[in-house]
Image (cartoon, rainbow, N blue to C red):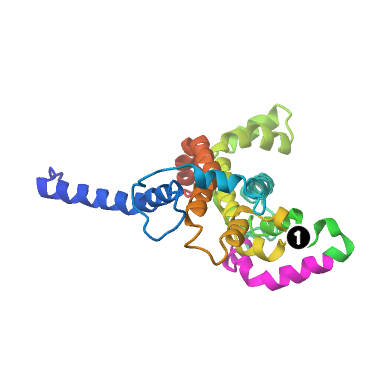
Amino acid sequence: MYRKPTFASNLIRHLVIWLVLVFALFPVIWIISGSFNPANTLVGQKLIPEQPSWVNYRALINSPQHPFPLWMWNSIKIALITSILAVAMTSLAAYAFSRFRFRGRRNGLFVFLLIQVFPQLLAMVAIYLLFLEVQKIFPAFGLNTHRALIITYLGGAIGVNTWLMKGYLDTIPRSLEEAAYIDGASPFQAFYRIILPLARPILAVLFFLQFIGIYSEFVLARVLLSSKENLTLAVGLQTFISEQYGKRWGVFSAAALLGAIPIVLLFFLVQKHIVSGLNRGGVKG
C-alpha cells in the first residue's frame, strides 16, 4: 500500500541529495578556483580567488618545454583510433556469438570473460619485452610509438565489451535478418544494414567507455612511451608537475580542466544512447 512521504522523510532525502552533490562538485570547484589563482600554489588557495587571472592557462599553452596541446592531441588521437577499432572488432565478435551456433562458442565466451579477469597490468613486463623484440624487426610498431600503444589497448578491449554487446544483440529479433535474407541480402549485409543501425545505442556506450578508459590511461602509456613529443596527456602532466606539485598547482588545475573538455563534449553527444544501451545490454546473457 502506497503511503505519502512525510515531511521528515522528504527532508532527509533532500539533505542526502545535497550532501552528495556537494561531495561530488567541491573538487571540481576547487580545481576551477586553482586554475584562476595567479599565485600558482596550493598553499593559501581560497575557494574564490581574490584576483582571478588567465595567467595559468597562458603559461600552460605557451610552455616550450611542455607541449600540452601536443599531449592532448596524442591522447585524443590514440583514444579515437583505438575506440573505433575496438567497437568494430567487438561488433563482429558479438554478432558471431549472438547469431551463429558453432563448436567452441560457449568456451569462447568463457575464455573472453576469463581473460578480462586478469588486467593488462599483470603483463606489463611481458608487453614491454615483446615490443622490444618487435622493434628490431618492425621499428614502426616498436617501443615509443603510438601504434604499439594502440595494439596493446586493443588486446584488452574485446572481453567484457563482447559480452555487453552480445546481450544487446540478443534482444534484436532474428525475424528482421530473416526478412533481409529473403530479399537477397547476405549475412554481412544484414549485419551492416539491419543490425548495426538498431544497435546504435550500445555502440555509442562502448565507444564512450572505451574512449574514457584510454584517454585517461597512465601506466601502460608510461611504460611504452618515452620521448616528450609522443607522450599522452596523463603521462605528460605527470612529467610536467614532477615533484613540484605545490608550486605548479594552478597550471596543473588549468591542464586538468582543459583535458576534461573532450570527455564532456563526447558525453553530451552520446548521452541519449547511454541509458538505453546499458539497460538493454543487460537483459540477456
Q: Is residue 272 visible?
A: yes
**Number of marks:** 1
Whether residue 212 is situated above or below residue 138 in the rendered picture:
above
Q: Where does residue 231 sit, x and y in percent of width and height?
A: 68, 56
| Callout 1: SS | loop
Q: Is residue 201 left or right of residue 108?
A: left
Residue bearing the label numbered 1: 144
* Residue that sits furthest to the left in the current view: 7
Along the viewing direction, whichever of 69 and 261 lies nearer the viewer: 69
Residue at 83% from the left image edge and 55% from the top image edge: 140
Q: Which residues are magenta?
A: 110-134
What amino acid does circle 1 point to? Asn
Q: Where does residue 158 sit, x and y in percent of width and height?
A: 64, 55
* Residue that sits furthest to the right in the current view: 137
Q: Residues within 10 Å of mark 1 (few under 14, many from 20)?
A: many
Q: Is residue 224 left or right of residue 274?
A: right
Q: Where is residue 109, by image quadrant?
A: bottom right
Q: Where does residue 217 sit, x and y in percent of width and height?
A: 59, 58
Whether residue 74 is situated above or below residue 249 in the rendered picture:
above
Q: Where does residue 271 sit, x and y in percent of width and height?
A: 47, 38
* Residue that sits furthest to the top in the current view: 183
Residue at 41% from the left image edge and 43% from the top image edge: 52
| Magenta-drawn stretch contains 103 | no
Along the viewing direction, whichever of 139 and 162 lies nearer the viewer: 139
Q: Is residue 170 visible?
A: no
The rendered magenta stretch, by its main secondary structure, is classed as helix
